[in-house]
């Protein structure tokens, strides 16, 4: 069997880079994407191709370049994403649209260009990187949660619609991992006259602390490898600490008001 060709969006740093490094060690032929290769002149872990998931022309060009090089795409990992925080009432709507443009519309744009290639091949796997946060409306992270939750849902639709073509889709929802996501995150300013000032400020500090103390992103790469090697992937996977993963189980079995109190209690610490 030929070595599988893997394309990872947002592969120049963070979780995307960790996934690529791990898969390359396993012998896969890995390509990552970035909006501007000039920002990574010393990047040597695997080839980078230029792509902005918000721009369909760059997606088309990237896919054509990869097909010209490798003649196929076996695995697409939709990893590119942005963080966004803020009180729902105070988050600028233009920032909401920007977040969805990358976290939701972006993966759809890429899938819609890659699926015809996989259909011709009569095979392919798409793994959409979502988030454990996408399973619940977290305070001050509602837009991020919603964008990732929406991607979880549409993946289920894509999965059923493309099954007859030999294409498989799944999602992987990571918890907190030590990455540079905070540096590119949009956060609504903490306004002095905001009724949310104290609560939002403490939440921002907790979010940054969680990322800094998060797990090794290499664990996400290991989970991705297992999914690729699975004959029939499940619709959804999760990777993270025990408490992060068990929270999803608790949401399914506890009364909604009880679960909400747990989230509020955790957020107030």
Image (tube, helix red, strand yellow):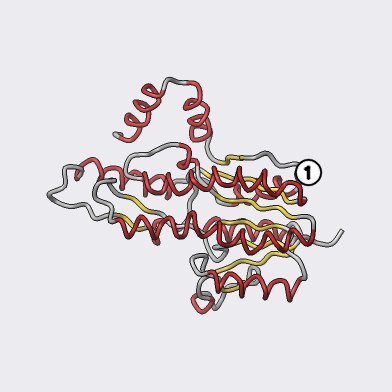
* Quadrant hosting residue 18: bottom right
Which residue corresponds to the image point at 68% horizontal and 59% vertical from the top-left?
A: 115
Does 187 sit above or below residue 150? below
Eyeballing the image, is 91 above or below 245? below
Relative to 146, 113 lies left or right: right
Is residue 67 toward the left or the right of residue 246 in the image?
A: right
Residue 110, percent across and down?
Answer: 59, 62
Instruction: Report the number of numbered marks.
Output: 1
- Residue extending farthest right: 1
Residue at 55% x, 66% y is 12
Q: Camera-side residue: 238 or 61?
A: 61
The percent coordinates of residue 152 (x first, y second) are 54, 44
**Residue at the image position 58 percent from the left and 68 percent from the top:** 33
Residue 125: x percent and y percent? 71, 52
Q: Which residue is mark 1?
A: 231
Residue 229 in the image: state x and y as whole percent.
76, 47
The quarter of the rendered structure image containing the N terminus is: bottom right
Secondary structure found at label 1: loop
Q: Is residue 262 left or right of residue 46?
A: left
**Residue occupying image coordinates x 77% and y 60%:** 4
- For the C terminus, the image quarter is top left
Depth check: 82 or 256 in front? 256
């Amino acid at each position: 069997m030929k070595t599988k060709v893997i394309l990872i969006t947002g592969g120049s740093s963070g979780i995307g880079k960790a996934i690529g490094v791990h898969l390359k060690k396993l012998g896969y032929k890995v390509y990552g994407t970035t909006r501007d290769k000039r920002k990574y002149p010393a990047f040597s872990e695997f080839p980078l191709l230029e792509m902005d998931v918000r721009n369909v022309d760059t997606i088309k060009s990237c896919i054509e370049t990869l097909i010209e090089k490798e003649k196929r795409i076996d695995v697409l990992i939709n990893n590119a994403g942005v963080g966004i925080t803020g009180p729902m009432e105070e988050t600028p709507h233009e920032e909401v649209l920007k977040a969805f443009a990358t976290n939701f519309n972006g993966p759809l744009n890429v899938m819609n260009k890659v699926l015809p290639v996989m259909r011709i091949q009569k095979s392919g796997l798409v793994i959409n990187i979502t988030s454990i946060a996408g399973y619940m409306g977290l305070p001050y992270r509602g837009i991020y949660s919603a964008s990732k939750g929406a991607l979880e849902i549409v993946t289920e639709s894509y999965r059923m619609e493309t099954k007859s073509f030999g294409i498989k889709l799944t999602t992987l929802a990571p918890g907190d991992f030590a990455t540079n996501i905070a540096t590119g995150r949009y956060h609504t300013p903490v306004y002095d006259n905001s009724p949310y000032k104290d609560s939002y400020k403490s939440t921002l500090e907790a979010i940054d602390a969680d990322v800094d103390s998060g797990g090794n992103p290499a664990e996400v790469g290991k989970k991705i490898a297992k999914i690729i090697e699975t004959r029939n992937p499940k619709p959804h996977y999760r990777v993270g600490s025990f408490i992060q993963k068990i929270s999803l189980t608790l949401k399914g079995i506890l009364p909604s008001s009880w679960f909400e109190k747990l989230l509020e209690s955790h957020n107030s610490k």
